[in-house]
Image (cartoon, rainbow, N blue to C red):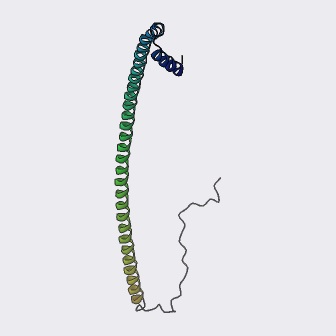
C-alpha cells in the first residue's frame, strides 16, 4: 500500500466510523512498530560497522603517518651527515689549496734563490783566467777493459 491510499483510508475511517475499517488498521500498527524496530536495528548495525571500519582506517593512517615520520627522520639524519661530510670536504679542499699555495711560494723562492746563486757563480766564473792557446787539447785514448770478441767462437 502506498502512503496516499493509506491517508485516504484514514480520512475515510475517521469521517465514517465503522468497526470494520478500524479493525482493519489495528493489525497494521504492530507491523509498523516491528518494521520500525527492524530498521532501527539495521541502522545501528550499519553504524557499528562504519565505526569499526573508521577505527581500522584511523589505525592504518596512524601507522602510515608513523612510518612516514620515521622515514623523514632518517632522511633528515642522512642529510645532516651529508652536510657534515660536505663541510668537512670543503674544509679539506681549503687546506689543500693553502698547502698548494705555500708549496708554490716555496718553489718560487727556491727558484729565485737558485737563479741568484747561478748568477753569482757565473759572475765568479768571469774572473777566472782563460787557458792560453799554447796548450792544445789532445784526445787521449784509454785501454778498454772489455775483452775482444775477435777470436772467440
Pinpoint residue 125: horizontal percent, then vertical percent.
42, 88
Query: From the image, which quarter does the N terminus lie in?
Result: top right
Q: Nearer the viewer, residue 98 or 11?
A: 11
Count of picture labels: 0
Q: Which of the 4 image quarters holds residue 57? A: top left
Residue in the foreground of this view, choosing between 9 and 65? 9
Residue drawn at x 35%, y 50% is 81
> Which residue is more in the foreground, 62 or 74?
62
Furthest residue toward front: 16
In the image, residue 130 sits, relative to residue 97, either above or below, namely below
Please say if 37 is above or below 137. above
**Figure check: 92 above or below 73:** below
**Image location of residue 69, percent across then percent down:** 36, 41
Residue 72, quarter of picture: top left
Residue at x 54% of width, y 77% of height = 140
Q: Position of residue 150 (x, y in %)?
A: 65, 60
Residue drawn at (36%, 78%) of the image: 109
Q: Is residue 59 above or below residue 77?
A: above
Percent across and percent down for residue 83 are 36, 54
- The residue sitting at 35% across, 40% down in the picture is 70
Amino acid at each position: 500500500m502506498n502512503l496516499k491510499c493509506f491517508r485516504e483510508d484514514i480520512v475515510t475511517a475517521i469521517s465514517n466510523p465503522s468497526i470494520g475499517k478500524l479493525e482493519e488498521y489495528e493489525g497494521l500498527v504492530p507491523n509498523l512498530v516491528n518494521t520500525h524496530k527492524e530498521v532501527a536495528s539495521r541502522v545501528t548495525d550499519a553504524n557499528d560497522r562504519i565505526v569499526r571500519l573508521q577505527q581500522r582506517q584511523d589505525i592504518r593512517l596512524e601507522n602510515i603517518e608513523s612510518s612516514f615520520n620515521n622515514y623523514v627522520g632518517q632522511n633528515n639524519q642522512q642529510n645532516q651527515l651529508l652536510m657534515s661530510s660536505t663541510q668537512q670536504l670543503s674544509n679539506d679542499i681549503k687546506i689543500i689549496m693553502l698547502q698548494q699555495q705555500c708549496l708554490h711560494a716555496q718553489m718560487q723562492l727556491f727558484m729565485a734563490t737558485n737563479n741568484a746563486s747561478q748568477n753569482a757563480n757565473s759572475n765568479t766564473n768571469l774572473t777566472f783566467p782563460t787557458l792560453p792557446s799554447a796548450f792544445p787539447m789532445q784526445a787521449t785514448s784509454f785501454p778498454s777493459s772489455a775483452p775482444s770478441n775477435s777470436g772467440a767462437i
